[in-house]
Image: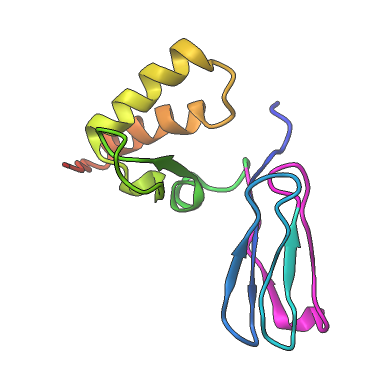
Amino acid sequence: MENRQLIHNSVTCLECGEVLESLHVHDYRTCNCPQATSVDGGLSYERFGGKDLAKIQSNHIYSDSPFEVIREHVTRGGRGRNMDEKLKYVKLQDINESWLAAIITYEEEHRPNNRYLPYYRQEVEYRKTNNIKIGE
């Protein structure tokens, strides 16, 4: 059985509504309201805090979560087809067909141990099963 892995690390400050996501191990994020909600750890560990823990909603997603939840939270960064656009992160469920195919090809060739590669492949199957097509 696969070890349970953290695949999304974020919290919501219930005082100001800001969603804070930590993307890498020392990516400490905090909101600017008096609650001072914070999150840290990226995908290495989950740590969050603030003045009142009852005012924090944990949004942590693990590898054993339902795929419908995973595909809403796994993201991929990109700079457009010609690499001339500002970096933006797109949810797996919103990545178009050609980009998804290119991601899988790239990861299989260059980073076959990428922790997200199984989810990219699973997304292809999920779309086939549910007759989902996402054009450019």
The magenta region covers 41-62
Residue farthest left in this picture:
135
Task: Give the image's coloring scheme.
Answer: rainbow
Total labels: the figure holds 0
Residue 28 lies left or right of residue 93; in this view the side is: right
Work out whether residue 9 or residue 119 is closer to the camera in this orientation and state it: 9
Work out whether residue 117 or residue 41 is closer to the camera in this orientation and state it: 41
Residue farthest top in this picture:
109
Q: Is residue 90 above or below residue 109?
A: below
Work out whether residue 64 or residue 121 is closer to the camera in this orientation and state it: 121
On the image, the x and y values in percent for residue 43 come to: 69, 44
Residue 81 lies left or right of residue 60; in this view the side is: left
On the image, the x and y values in percent for residue 112 come to: 53, 15
Work out whether residue 14 or residue 61 is closer to the camera in this orientation and state it: 14
Please tell me which residue is depicted at 31% across the width and 45% down the height of the picture.
Answer: 85
Q: Is residue 112 above or below residue 18?
A: above
Asked which quadrant contains residue 44, the reply is top right
Q: Is residue 44 magenta?
A: yes
Q: Is residue 38 above or below residue 93?
A: below
Please tell me which residue is depicted at 40% across the width and 18% down the height of the picture.
Answer: 106
Q: Is residue 114 magenta?
A: no
Which image quarter holds the C terminus?
top left
Please tell me which residue is depicted at 37% across the width and 17% down the height of the picture.
Answer: 105
Please tell me which residue is depicted at 69% across the width and 28% down the height of the picture.
Answer: 2
Residue 69 lies left or right of residue 127; in this view the side is: right
Asked which quadrant contains residue 53, the reply is bottom right
Which image quarter holds the N terminus?
top right
Residue farthest front in this picture:
84
On the image, the x and y values in percent for residue 87 come to: 40, 46
